[in-house]
Amino acid sequence: MYERILLPTDGSVSTDKAVEQALNLADAYGASLHVLSVVDRTIVPPDVRSDILYDELEDECADAVSDVEAAANEAGVDVETTVLRGTPHRVILDYADKNDIDCIVMGTHGRRGLDRYLLGSVTEKVVRLSEVPVLTVRMNEEE
């Protein structure tokens, strides 16, 4: 059913449960796990000199995918890691399309009220626009 599973991660604690689910799913189906972290190019206005900031964010993203890679290796799951720059939901969807991904596993915050409608998370955008199934893993409010 699943041959290639995509796990977008930002390295936050909220993604730990998504990592666990993605590893379990990949192991159960003998699928490879693609781990992607995106340096968000939309967080700094274009007129600001941002090279140093983006380099630092890229290092953090590399650490995030490296941590998941280590967990995948320990679990015996084939893993491929990538760090890209761009608008996160677009990069995730483009990556899924170009790499023939069968399922996307993403963590989500339990946002409520007005924030949910005004801000719109990356996960929500991916769920709305993805052509493949998206498994969302909710983080507990206490976390």
Image: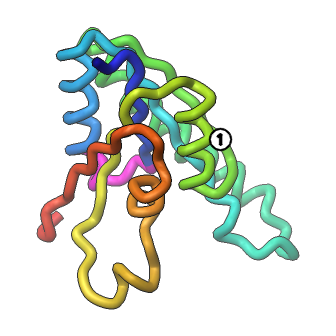
User: How far from the left and from the top, in percent, is residue 74?
Assistant: 26, 15
Number of numbered discs overlaid on the protein picture? 1
Residue at 58 percent of width and 33 percent of height: 97
Depicted 51 relative to depicted 4: above or below: below
- Residue under circle 1? 84
Of residues 23 and 16, the one nearer the viewer is 23
Residue at 19 percent of width and 58 percent of height: 139
Of residues 79 and 63, the one nearer the viewer is 79
Can you see residue 59?
no
User: How far from the left and from the top, in percent, is residue 44?
Assistant: 71, 71
Depicted 66 relative to depicted 3: above or below: below
Of residues 121 and 13, the one nearer the viewer is 121
Q: Is 58 on the left or on the right of 111, as rendered?
A: right
Disc 1 crowd, CA 10 A, few/some/many (<14, 14-19, 20+): some
Residue at 59 percent of width and 35 percent of height: 95
Q: Furthest-front residue in view?
A: 131
- Asked which quadrant contains residue 141, the reply is bottom left
User: How far from the left and from the top, in percent, is residue 60?
Assistant: 53, 47
Q: Callout 1, which amino acid?
A: Leu
Q: If the image is split into quadrants, where does the C terminus sit?
A: bottom left
Give the residues in magenta: 10-16
Of residues 15 and 91, the one nearer the viewer is 91
Residue at 38 percent of width and 12 percent of height: 78
Residue 35 forms part of the magenta stretch: no
Q: If the image is split into quadrants, where does the N terminus sit?
A: top left
Can you see residue 130?
yes
- Asked which quadrant contains residue 126, the reply is bottom left
Colour scheme of the rendered structure:
rainbow
User: How far from the left and from the top, in percent, is residue 71?
Assistant: 29, 24
Q: Secondary structure at mark 1?
A: strand
